[in-house]
Amino acid sequence: MASVDVTIRGAGIFGLSVAWACARRGARVRVIDTTGIGAGSSGGVVGALSPHVPEAWNPKKAFQLESLLMAGDWWAGVEAASSLPSGFGRVGRLQPLADAAAVDLARARSEGAKALWQGRAEWRVRQATGAAWEPVTPSGWLVEDTLSARISPQLGLAALVGALRAQRVEVRVGAADEVGAVVHATGVAGLADLSAYVGRTVGAGVKGQALALRHEACDLPQLFVDGLHIVPHVDGTVAIGSTSEPVWHEDGPDEQLDGLLTRAVAAVPVLAGAEVVARWAGVRPRAASRAPVLGEWPGRAGHYVANGGFKIGFGMAPKVAEVMADLVLDGRDAVPEAFSVVALLSKGVARDGAL
């Protein structure tokens, strides 16, 4: 590449997505990752793209809604450019309801969805039918939403890399010079760098673990049961996750995955006996604000931050990519105030404090 307009540091979901948005607008882009493509938390297995509940609306929920609504066309564009599958599917989601009070609350939320989801998706309460791919529901009722989707993290990242290379974008593993505007999308390491720069902790890593089973259910909805995601994928696997561990003793998978599997089989008995084909662990970047961190890096002209995806990075990525391209290429700041680096710095704590 003769010259570069934008250097992206980090080849996870935020970095590759921002690179794609910039390249589509004609920018000359270079992506650098010292470790590897999807080597951090983006290289997981779950891939649940799911909305927050349609109530107590705020900028984070609105931003996520916009990103989920645009995801189908966005990933279709990536697939068309790369000629590779992403594993995206608008499969919807089922959730069990524990009792009559939960049913009443879910019905109230369905009214909220009618207003907040702009008529483009539904949240409805329906009776369970006893189908094998329905979670056990004590009340006999389920929430079914049509907004939720799934993505294969590894296929999605590969499709993004293919799309970028089709646009003559250099994606380099290893060291390379920073040229032009620089977007730091380096996950947990990036939060540590930002913390060191400002002299106080503004985020930290949280370990997560997940597993995948061999079970064919690729056209069926994802399930969400008592905090557990159960997500069918196009490769004939079902992903189950995940843990959330602010403190951990080893980086790799451990016995907590056995507990996830036990919970999944109790919720969906048809999974009993399915072969475990993958066990995954990674450390996800969680900002002190509990929101994505986007915008200019204070005091470093021409440097920007795209971080803090935590558990919702893939769901947020299409919208994150576009607002970061707006900012970096056009100087137009459409980042929600709650997501700004300045907002994050107001949430940070002293170096010896806790988030």
Image: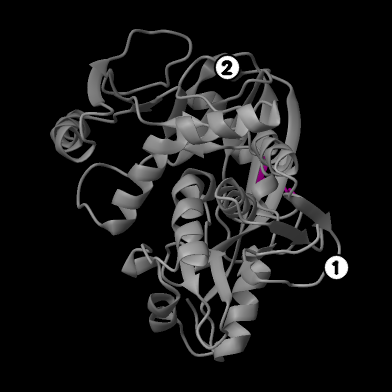
Which quarter of the figure has residue 195? bottom right
Q: Which mark is residue 199?
A: none
Dot 2 or dot 1: first in sequence order is 1
Q: In what quadrant of the picture does the N terminus appear?
A: bottom right
What number of labels is visible? Answer: 2
Which quarter of the figure has residue 46? top right
Colour pattern of the rendering: one colour
User: Please, what secondary structure does the residue beneath circle 2 have?
Assistant: loop
Residue at the disc numbered 2: 218
Nearest the camera: 286 or 249? 286
The amino acid on which the numbered mark 2 sits, given as a three-letter code, is Cys
The residue stretch that appears in magenta: 253-257
Residue at the disc numbered 1: 175
Nearest the camera: 42 or 239? 42
Which quarter of the figure has residue 131? top left
Q: Is residue 142 left or right of residue 288?
A: left
Q: Is residue 101 visible?
A: yes
